Image (cartoon, coloured by chain):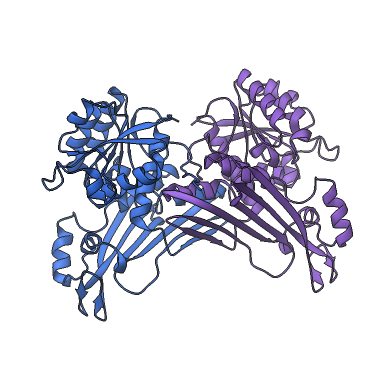
Chain colours: A blue, B purple
Amino acid sequence: MKKKINAVQFGLGPIGQLCAKTIIQKHSDRINLVGAVDIHPAKVGKDLGELIGVENLGITVVDDIRSILRKNKVDLVFHTTTSFMSDVKEQLVELIKLKLNIVSSTEELFFPWFRNTQIAQEIDNLARRFKVRVLGTGVNPGFVMDVLPAVLTQVCTSVKKIRVERVVNASKRRLPLQLKIGAGLKVGEFKEKKATGKFGHIGLVESLQFLAYILNIQLDEVEEELEPIVTKRSLQTEYLTIQKGRVAGIHHTAVGYKDGKEVITLDLKMFVGDHKDYDAVYIDGEPPIKMKILNGVFGDTATVASLINSAYLIFNARPGLLTMADIGLPHGYLKI
Amino acid sequence: MKKKINAVQFGLGPIGQLCAKTIIQKHSDRINLVGAVDIHPAKVGKDLGELIGVENLGITVVDDIRSILRKNKVDLVFHTTTSFMSDVKEQLVELIKLKLNIVSSTEELFFPWFRNTQIAQEIDNLARRFKVRVLGTGVNPGFVMDVLPAVLTQVCTSVKKIRVERVVNASKRRLPLQLKIGAGLKVGEFKEKKATGKFGHIGLVESLQFLAYILNIQLDEVEEELEPIVTKRSLQTEYLTIQKGRVAGIHHTAVGYKDGKEVITLDLKMFVGDHKDYDAVYIDGEPPIKMKILNGVFGDTATVASLINSAYLIFNARPGLLTMADIGLPHGYLKI
């Protein structure tokens, strides 16, 4: 483990801001945040402290990381921009060429070897060449529907089938998340958005492929479905009014088949309503395992935790494009 | 990962027999069991298949592993003999000097760095010198009260306190386990047994010390308590009748303190009764996490699973005395 990590926050959306704030408030003993990058004109030039609601930090947000590197030795970048490999590829290439290790919340980067094989290969080659590590992680993908179920199978002599459920009540979540799941849309609008292929939860198939990879099975087929959850009564959040018959959120599933059998099922529901959050893993194995996380794992905080806790671990791993199976036993820290 | 592991089963008590049987029936595609060792005269000379209730395997149980090594190249030993470091030390030393990697169910070996520091150091030095890996694992210690809680903290930006509960109903378990927890004893007899220091569940403090180590906290103090659970009504198992007022099992706790605060609490109850098994992890952190495994994790099968699944992983680790934090992401295998 490195003594102290010099880091840059790259991307200052909600997750990036929370990540920077968490580092400053809770992890400054071992992570030294030396810079922050965002391309949004309203953010560039501001002090990071002002942006994240803490005291002035003397860190001015810049739109080009090179200006930070001229004055600081940087080990690692917390990369929190967008969800898709095709969109972040150029950012990653640039950061790798600057010899920066990367921990990223880009959902498709969690396990890009199937749906983005070519980009994954390029990133891996480049990272090896420049001797840096690149890891995609978070809470989902990154933990509840992939890493945690994988770890639970450690105590099974064999596994026949695995089912993971995540239910998130979006009522109290931030507006971008409510919009991301289509809350308030008409069913027809939902279908149009769905047709773009860039709507709903990103990373479910990546979680499935990671699980198949780590449980050592070659899936014959993967089926993904995204359906609207329609509310039967009018709903109200801090930001939205959702009329009866409109979309309250998503029901997103990914199923992996082997020899005609359903072997891995991921079932995700994120919607506005009065239901309780939970995460559950059901393993049909020896012994069988029924795990439940009551009230679920709160997404934003958990994603930031996974980014920061992984940052400590990646320096023990080989250079290249890594997965959560490459950085040792994931874990957090007791701080009293 | 090695293509195929040549292994010897060392110790043929209940766990050793189940381990051998599981390898033969479920893992023979990647583990080649080439020998079995036990010192019990009733077992030596018998075919292993007869002992574990499968077809004749052509593997004769021997009392000296050297006779197996003369005819076979062996990579790894599944070591399942006794619970205490002081008792297994000579066995481990012998196996290491024979250049054999070891995965062991010896509870104190799971994390021997605190209560058996000197033996741990000797084993570590020797294992490094002979370039083999030595790992202690199982279900408890090895998973439910240490590895799993550690992994769950991955999604916490900070952890203030952690509490782990395991409740096992011993009613349907094998007789040695019922006797191990004092079922049927008078309270006075329980106290005498307790005074020997070799009674009850072994490894609870090792789980606690592992958690403290991985969560990066130096405990100031550890308190361990072992109390009898006394039944208020007469109980009946397949093997025992337990009269009202006698011991039904154990309540075993280990608490770690830092700066006067209780930071890690492990609470284990194993007793005969009509209660349901469960495992639970409560993390006072951000976010808070309440995890429950309904009906628990069945011990014997899970211990064997942890031994076998870890055997696949240790070859990626450096030589030496390892912990479950050194072998990568623990996981099992899908076998349809």
Where is residue A177 shown, x and y percent of the image? Answer: 25, 60
Q: Residue at x 57, y 55 (%)?
A: B163
In which quadrant of the rendered view does residue B235 lie? bottom right
Where is residue B66 shown, x and y percent of the image? Answer: 74, 23
Most extreme residue toward the left, as rendered? A41
The answer to whether residue A244 shows anywhere in this view is: yes
Please, is residue B183 above or below residue A152 in the view? below
Where is residue B300 shown, x and y percent of the image? Answer: 66, 51
Left or right of A223? Residue B223 is: right
The answer to whether residue A83 shows anywhere in this view is: no
Left or right of B152? Residue A310 is: left
In which quadrant of the rendered view does residue A172 lie? bottom left
Q: Residue at x 18, y 55 (%)?
A: A197
Total numbered circles = 0
Where is residue A140 shown, x and y percent of the image? Answer: 35, 52
Camera-nearest residue between A314 and A259: A314
Camera-nearest residue between A109 and B193: B193
Most extreme residue toward the top, as rendered? B129
